[in-house]
Image (cartoon, grey):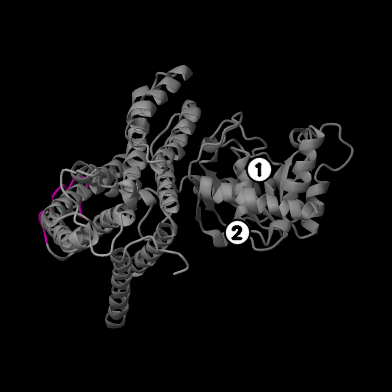
Amino acid sequence: MFGLFDHLSHQIHLTFIGVAVLLGIAEAALLARRRRVPERDDSELAQRIRTWWVIVISFAILFGVSRTTAIVFFALVSFLALKEFLSMVPTRRVDHRVLFWAYLAIPLQYVWVGSEWYGMFIIFIPVYMFILLPTRMVMIGETSGFLRAVGSLQWGLMTTVYSLSHGAMLLSIQPPVNPRVAPIWPAGSSQESGGAALLVFLILLTQFNDVAQYCWGRALGETKIVPKVSPNKTVVGMLGGVCSTTVLAAAIGPWLTFMDLLRSITAGLIIGVFGFAGDLSVSALKRDLGVKDCGYTLPGHGGVLDRVDSLTFTAPLFFHFVYYFYG
Amino acid sequence: MITALRYLFFLFIVRPVILFVIGLNVRRIANLPTEGPAVVVANHNSHLDTFVLMTLFGMQRLKDVHPVAAADHFLRNPVMAWFSQHIVGIIPLEREVKGMRTDPLAGICNALRENQILIIFPEGTRGKPEVREEFKTGIAHVAKRFPEVPFTPVFLHGLGKSLPKGEGILVPFFCDVFIGRSVRWTGKRETFMHELCEEMSALENEKPIPNWT
């Protein structure tokens, strides 16, 4: 189709179509309920589904054009998420220039991703930025609030830039001649689309896990799991979400990616459990700061950071899981 | 030719910077005047304030929107003066009016007579970042001469963090824009200023803003 998606496998095409069908079903279910119970206010849900369409379509286009545009997509998400983070947490006026350096880490980190320079990619933020930012801060010389300022900035960079960039780095995964586990290539897929399939798997499962946790929690479950952090999360919601995610991983993992059934199930478990933890850690952050949403960029969802909160935990974990066995 | 330059500048530089690099979160865009003569009254923290307000009006109304800006600052050298007057489209205002024989508000009055939309910062200066200073009462003179013109208060938060006075480097932060209900001349300077300031304080208190230190 106009050269779009041509470099991706047939299974990836079908996955995108599947997601579009699911969104269509959600839309239809909403319309049906509206006809049945017209007095119920569902504007937020309707808005959330509409925003889902925007997210899926814009991701599909940038992902479908080329590997470079897919990486640019991740860089833009990191930028918006870091901007939301820094607009939300208290920063010091004196750190103006330090924050500027922190933003510069985004293009650099994604240049390492684009050039497949793994060694630099993996240490740039946890080593070089970790040292550069406090160095710039002490040159300014303001000690009051130093630890809070440098700590929040490091946390922000680690979650919104370093963690998320692992998603884009999946595109570069190519099993060597003798990996720990032999990849089982899905029918008709090329070496080139192997990393892309892993990325689709990660994002689909992480977002599915969010939705599944929400639906299970709404449908059943009374015992709250961490009431102080998030009053909506229940034990049943959490377990139901993890199980659904693992089942979906088992179903599509061996078909979509080069992982075998055992690795697919394990990946599903990791994504289910730590997607939940990532979601909660951003919830705790918001509660600490007394804000409801991180931003307003995605109507019905809140900010970009509200949407990618679970991905900040699942992306690096899934990357290193795959990298250990197949990297 | 210069008009084309002005459009290109706003389309390719101002709007991408304001809408993408900064990012706006606007409350009640419908309160913004749709046509002139009208005055938008805003707090002032950064050079970006002007561009954010002009962006809110969109490209169609760009030709009608003019910020009122300090003549002593923006006309201080020929390049700056050309850029300010032709590209940004400012209406220069002398801040020091002692001993002046001509009417300092003549430029503003002419523009309002020509159905333009003006942007006025009654604080008169950007001052300390993210600190609102007392409004100067010059704006009441304008309201008195044009009792029918609506004065729409807009409170901006975040731009003083992005580009404070004295800083040359822009650091992205989301900007909150709160648009209030418009105020018209009340018949008395004190009550007009009181009403305007009350409306502005209400906008300022809409969202809890932590002290920026």
Kindly identify which residue carries mark 2.
B32
Magenta stretch: give its range. A221-232
Q: Position of residue A48 (x, y in %)?
A: 35, 64
Kindly identify which residue carries mark 1.
B121
In this view, A151 is above or below B63: above
First in residue order: circle 1 vs circle 2: 2
Quadrant, the N terminus of chain B: bottom right
Q: Identify the amino acid type marked 1.
A: Phe
Tell me what residue is drawn at x 17 percent, y 51 percent: A267
| Dot 2: element | loop
Asked if residue B67 lies left or right of residue A299, the reply is right
Q: Position of residue B191 (x, y in %)?
A: 64, 48
Asked if badges 1 and 2 are on one and the same chain, I answer yes
Dominant secondary structure (helix, strand or loop) of the stretch shown in magenta: loop
Q: Is residue A222 magenta?
A: yes
Q: Position of residue A253 (x, y in %)?
A: 19, 59
| Dot 1: element | loop
